[in-house]
């Protein structure tokens, strides 16, 4: 047997799985198969780590002083043009921060370096899984470079367009939102001082996350047609239009970085396991960024999977994988349903929806137990 576990994908979720599993099971040889030729994938995203996720990564020694961290101490949520609004505060919830904003590239690099220091982790760069042959006691894997591997468990952590998911023929439920996400880094005339903003508009949400040096991470959602126009805007027009859509609550926008656009959809695998195989992270569930829960949900996949494998001899045993699958469903239901509700309820100015959603925001603002439950859900804590 070449490896006890083979992990397809060496980005955030895949590298985190390798690290946590290797630490928990130093007796298991683990192989990470990563398409990028030199090191981990280059990820241009800025990620909002929920409080529980940040705490776990600090415990692992991954989130340390070498990673740029900006705490989210306050969140302001509003509906453009209407009275509905609410605020969440870390102090009210009894925590130092509701979350932490970090550059994904730094986090991936740190995970990669941590994995390379472990003697039971082998990192195969410039490689991807090409074929999967499921045997009774093992899985035979052929890589695109011709190399062959045998393993007791294959973990597909290869992202939203997972080749492992397709090869295993794991069906998914897909909801197309006809929306496109735009990410960029904005420079403002003043710092956000720990404030994050979520502003709902008739076309889709606009989110601003605090960063150092008067900067903010922007996630701006467009409808399909509007996105095509936005791709061609010059910086000056982009800044002007963004300012008009968001307002001046966060100050004046003085500069923007290059923009990156990507289509938004909800994808959820109806089954995340096959014989000696499991898919996790975005390979299993891809979310709209409206609530910033994608990686946080994936991190909890990793925690649950590693806990399930901690004391077993055969990691590919069906009862072990089935137990993992069942344990994750309640969390999926809560976060996916919340995300989908926010997208469908707040991405329009459809008359019958306006009053209920503004009443919901006002209720959230004035009913302390409800607000606390919502805050704990977004922080990745039990409600």
Image: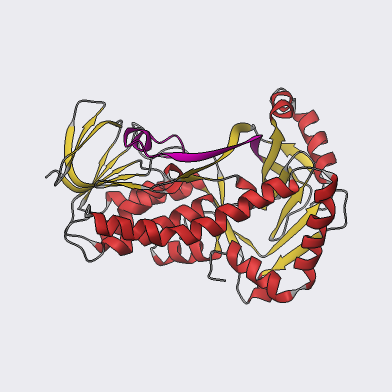
**Where residue 229 appears, x then y in whole percent?**
74, 24
Give the camera-side residue of 251 and 357: 357
- 358 relative to 208 in the view: left or right: right
Answer yes or no: is residue 210 visible.
no
In the rendered view, tell whether residue 215 sits above or below residue 52: above
Q: Residue furthest left?
A: 1
The image shows residue 100, relative to residue 272, as above or below, that is: below
Eyeballing the image, is 106 above or below 310? Answer: above
Residue at image coords 85%, 40%? 244
Q: How is the image coloured?
A: secondary structure
Task: Provide residue 128's location: percent of width, then percent of height.
Answer: 30, 32
Q: Is residue 258 left or right of residue 311?
A: right
Q: Start and end of the magenta stretch?
A: 159-184
x 73%, y 56%: residue: 192
Residue located at (79% from left, 44% from top): 201
Is 279 above or below relative to 264? below
Q: Is residue 181 visible?
A: yes
Q: Quadrant of the N terminus?
A: top left
Residue 255, percent across and down?
74, 37
Q: Image quadrant for the C terminus? A: bottom right
Residue 21, by quadrant, is bottom left
Residue nearest the observer in this picture, 160 or 182: 160
Q: Nearer the viewer, residue 118 or 254?
A: 118
Q: Position of residue 68 (x, y in %)?
A: 54, 54
């Amino acid at each position: 047997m070449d490896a006890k576990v083979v992990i397809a994908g060496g980005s955030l979720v895949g590298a985190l799985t390798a690290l946590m599993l290797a630490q928990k099971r130093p007796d298991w040889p683990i192989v990470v198969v990563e398409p990028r030729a030199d090191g981990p994938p280059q990820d241009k995203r800025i990620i909002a780590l929920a409080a529980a996720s940040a705490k776990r990564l600090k415990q692992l020694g991954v989130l340390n002083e070498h990673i740029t961290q900006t705490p989210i101490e306050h969140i302001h949520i509003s509906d453009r043009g209407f009275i509905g609004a609410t605020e969440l505060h870390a102090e009210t919830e009894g925590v130092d921060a509701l979350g932490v904003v970090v550059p994904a590239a730094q986090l991936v690099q740190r995970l990669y370096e941590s994995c390379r220091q472990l003697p039971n982790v082998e990192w195969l760069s410039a490689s991807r899984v090409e074929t999967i042959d499921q045997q009774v006691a093992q899985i035979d894997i052929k890589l695109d470079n011709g190399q062959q591997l045998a393993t007791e468990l294959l973990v597909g952590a290869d992202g939203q367009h997972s080749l492992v998911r397709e090869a295993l023929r794991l069906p998914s439920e897909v909801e197309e939102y006809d929306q496109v996400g735009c990410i960029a880094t904005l420079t403002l005339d003043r710092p956000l001082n720990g404030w994050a903003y979520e502003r709902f508009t008739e076309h889709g949400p606009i989110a601003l996350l605090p960063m150092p040096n008067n900067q903010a991470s922007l996630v701006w959602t467009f409808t399909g047609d509007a996105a095509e126009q936005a791709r061609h805007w010059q910086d000056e027009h982009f800044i002007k239009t963004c300012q008009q859509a968001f307002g001046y609550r966060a100050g004046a926008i003085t500069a923007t970085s290059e923009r990156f656009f990507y289509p938004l959809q909800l994808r959820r695998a109806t089954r995340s396991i096959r014989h000696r195989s499991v898919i996790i992270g975005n390979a299993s569930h891809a979310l709209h960024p409206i609530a910033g829960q994608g990686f946080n949900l994936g991190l909890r996949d990793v925690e649950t999977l590693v806990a399930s494998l901690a004391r077993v001899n055969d990691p590919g045993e069906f009862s072990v994988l089935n137990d993992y699958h069942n344990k994750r469903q309640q969390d999926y239901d809560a976060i996916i349903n919340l995300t989908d509700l926010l997208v469908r309820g707040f991405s329009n100015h459809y008359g019958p929806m306006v009053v209920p959603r503004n009443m919901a925001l006002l209720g959230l603002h004035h009913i302390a137990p409800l607000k606390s439950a919502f805050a704990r859900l977004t922080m990745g804590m039990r409600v």
